[in-house]
Image (cartoon, rainbow, N blue to C red):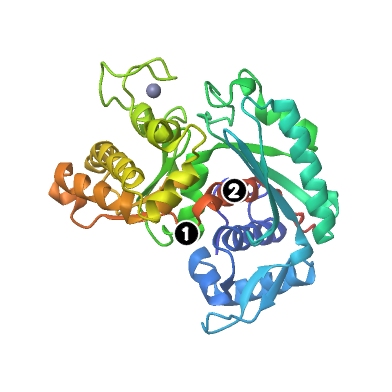
Amino acid sequence: MSAPPGADPRPGSQSSLRSANQQRVLETVRRHGGLTQAQISRRTALAPSTVSNIVHELIGAGLLVMEADHAGRRGQLITFRGSAGHVLGVDVGHRHATVAVADLNQRILAQRRHDLPEGHRFDEDLRLVDHSLQRLLEEIGVPRSGVLAGGLTVPAPVDLEGRVISAGAILPAWSGIDVRAEASALLGLPVVVENDADAGALGEHTWGAGRGTRHMAYLKLGHGVGSGLVLDGRLYRGATGSAGEIGHSTVDERGRLCRCGNRGCLETFVSSDEVVHLLAGTHGPDLTLADVVDAALAGDVGCARVIGDTGRTLGVTVANLCNTLNPELVVVGGELARSGELLLGPLREIVGRYGVRGAVRELRIEPARLGLQAHVAGAVIVALQHAELPVGPPRD
Ligand SMILES: [Zn+2]
């Protein structure tokens, strides 16, 4: 059994081989959550006896444990020990920040959602996150030193180095800030920054509606509109990290000016502001998107009409996306997705009309199973991907 190329500074030494194989086992458990030893063996292509030795070493080192498999599969599940380490997940939106602490098995142990004022500032937000993290750690009895990394999602494009490209109109007070560097310094942790739609795609692909799919698109419908793409089982970011910015695809080139500087972007027709604005005249100026969805579900004809029209408008862009990328699943996330078939029925109808038959015949369009949790779940996943596990390579 050989180590992957480039993984070993001293090829051939017993120690480096064992270390590389240990890393493969840990990476596999980290990526897939609890697995049996047989599953680890298949996924790493390591011999069952090698996996068994490594698993027992890592159990001895206090990093892994064996758990009974409650799903009824044969064999016991190998998972991370609860005390092996934790990560921070933060989802910052236009008017909220959700802060969560998870263990290395991606289980969220404690979480709090904070409402934020319009135009909230980066430094104040980070102080709030820092304070909230401390409170959550106290609640679950975990020391600050046990937090290995943080993931922070933002409603803005993020480049391949994890820098926020432009916070623009959604987080104006975050513009021009090196979010990754400043958040890492303030929180005293390595922090990874991720676009919220990409995080939602990761969350739904790992734990939600997209489990087991190879090609899926996640649509984020909110104050901003975007998508995260999982292609061939991996998040697809594109050349510069801007893949999936469907909120700025042109629907009407003579339409309203968009915050991106173009006119008539999809977002100007289907953002939460636009949905609420269309109903303000008849339903009052203090209406929120949650009110609109509740009213529509309770039978309000006007609210249902606006949500249905939103699904139709979205459908044209989603059909184009499907004609280009041919995903097997489109997951719709954000508050509006709570309206279920009122949104998804018209969306499916238009995708069926404009999608080429080969691309949409087998396509499923479903609401996000994690609901509003999808983004913070994704923040936890990116934190875990970058957390340095507290096990060093064994010495000779
Ligand atoms: Zn735009």
- Percent position of residue 352, x then y: 18, 49
Q: Is residue 233 visible?
A: no
- Percent position of residue 29, x then y: 60, 63
- Percent position of residue 204, x then y: 47, 54
Check residue 208 in the rendering and tell me which mark sits there, or answer none: 1
Q: Is residue 51 above or below residue 76?
A: above
Quadrant that contains the C terminus: bottom right
- In the image, 211: left or right of 263? right
Q: Is residue 333 above or below residue 165?
A: below
- In the image, 331: left or right of 204? left
Residue designated by label 2 = 376
Q: Is residue 345 above or below residue 178?
A: below
- Residue type highlighted by circle 1: Gly
- In the image, 325: left or right of 67? left
The foreground one among 341 and 140 is 341
Q: Is residue 314 visible?
A: yes
The foreground one among 232 and 200 is 200
- Residue type highlighted by circle 2: Val
Looking at mark 1, is its residue's CB closer than 8 Å to ligand 1?
A: no
Q: Residue at x 50, y 39 (%)?
A: 288
